[in-house]
Amino acid sequence: MKILVVDDSSTMRRIIKNTLVRIGYDDIVEAEHGVDALSKLDGVGMVLTDWNMPVMDGLTLVNSIRSNDQYKTVPIIMVTTEAAKEEIVVAIKAGVNDYIIKPFNQNTLQEKISKILGG
Amino acid sequence: MKAEYINPFIESTINALKTMAMVSPKREKLQVKKDGESAMYDISGIIGLAGGVVGSVVLSFPKETAMKIVASFIGEDVPDVNKDVLDAIGELTNIVAGSAKKIFYEQGHHFKISLPNVVYGKDHKINRARDVPCISVTFSSDAGPFAIEVSLKEVQ
Ligand SMILES: [Mg+2]
């Protein structure tokens, strides 16, 4: 399965990618922001996205993905420093399936990804 | 700037480094800065805060400390201060600002954080608004010393 990792930080993309490879997913596409991600959605089975990014932020990206019939049900995990309850609610309402708060422990990341992909 | 406003940043810095880089920093000196200019270590990550409070947060590291922290953060050797190191310091600053933002949110202060900027250069200085009070805190850690600087003002 192809997984799209969206974050403006190359470090964060690398950490997420290493975790995915460790749990057995190595077909990974990277994007630096929402607009970049929208052009790379073809054939993607899951999206992990940051919230705060230049050009197009993660919330706008989630809204765009969900308004496209083809990607209505693709699982989206938001990986962000935005940790206030009110913000998590906004993201869930927009259609995010799970939420990981930075700083995260790499085991937590691994568990959440495995949970979504396994179930 | 109320002294207690620095605490969410201290707490977030310690937590971010522990969780993501397995480095345990110890708080050292806390100092109120008067002038509008700060001398920094070699690499600084800067994020602006705007909303119910305005200001900025800076995380500043000597080159050696930054390289050790980033190596542990990404789980790979870091041979030099390359663009990965600068990116990682920016992301670390983002994580600290975001975690502090959440603590403020729960206390009723709402603000937004900017995208991070990173400055690299020996003895660089950072200018900040003179009318915004500033507190600096130094830390020691197994990766070496570093500092944070927080300028913050409530908007009436
Ligand atoms: Mg980001």
Image (tube, rainbow, N blue to C red):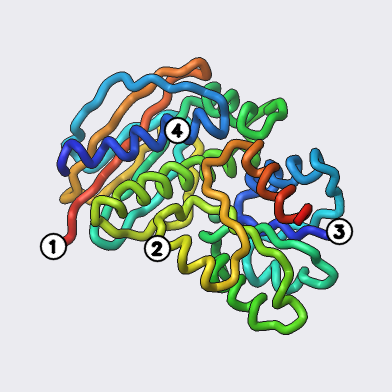
Going by the image, does B111 lie left or right of B36? Answer: right
Q: Which residue is mark 4?
A: B15
Task: Say if disc 3 is inside 8 Å of ligand 1.
Answer: no
Callout 1 secondary element: loop
Q: Is residue B117 above or below residue B41?
A: below
| Amino acid type of the residue tagged 1 in the rendering | Gln
Instruction: From the top left corner, tell me how far across and down residue B69 is, in percent.
Output: 56, 27
User: Which of the two discs, 1 and 3, sits closer to the camera?
Assistant: 3
Q: Does label 1 lie on the same chain as label 4?
A: yes
Q: Chain of mark 1?
A: B
The chain under label 3 reads A
What residue is pinned by disc 1? Answer: B156
The answer to whether residue B24 is left or right of residue A67 is left
- Report the Cα–Cα distance between label 2 and label 1: 23 Å
- Lower position in the chain sequence, tag 4 or tag 1: 4
Q: Which residue is tagged 2?
A: A86
Chain letter of the residue beneath label 2 in the structure image: A
Task: Count residues near mark 3 (Cα–Cα under 10 Å), then give few for <14, some for 14-19, many for 20+.
Answer: few
Mark 4 Cα-neighbour bin, 10 Å: few <14, some 14–19, many ≥20: many
Query: Does ligand 1 reach within 8 Å of label 2's beta carbon?
Result: no
At x 28% / y 35%, what residue is drawn? B7
Residue B154 position by quadrant: bottom left
Q: Nearer the viewer, mark 2 or mark 1?
A: 2
State how far apart marks 4 and 3 are (Cα). 34 Å
In whole angstroms, how far apart are the C-alphas of marks 1 and 3? Answer: 52 Å
Q: Do marks 2 and 3 both belong to one polypeptide chain? A: yes
Q: Chain of mark 4?
A: B
**For the C terminus of chain A, which image quadrant?**
bottom right
* Circles 4 and 2 on the same chain: no
**Of tags 4 and 1, which is closer to the observer?**
4
Q: Residue at x 53, y 66 (%)?
A: A92
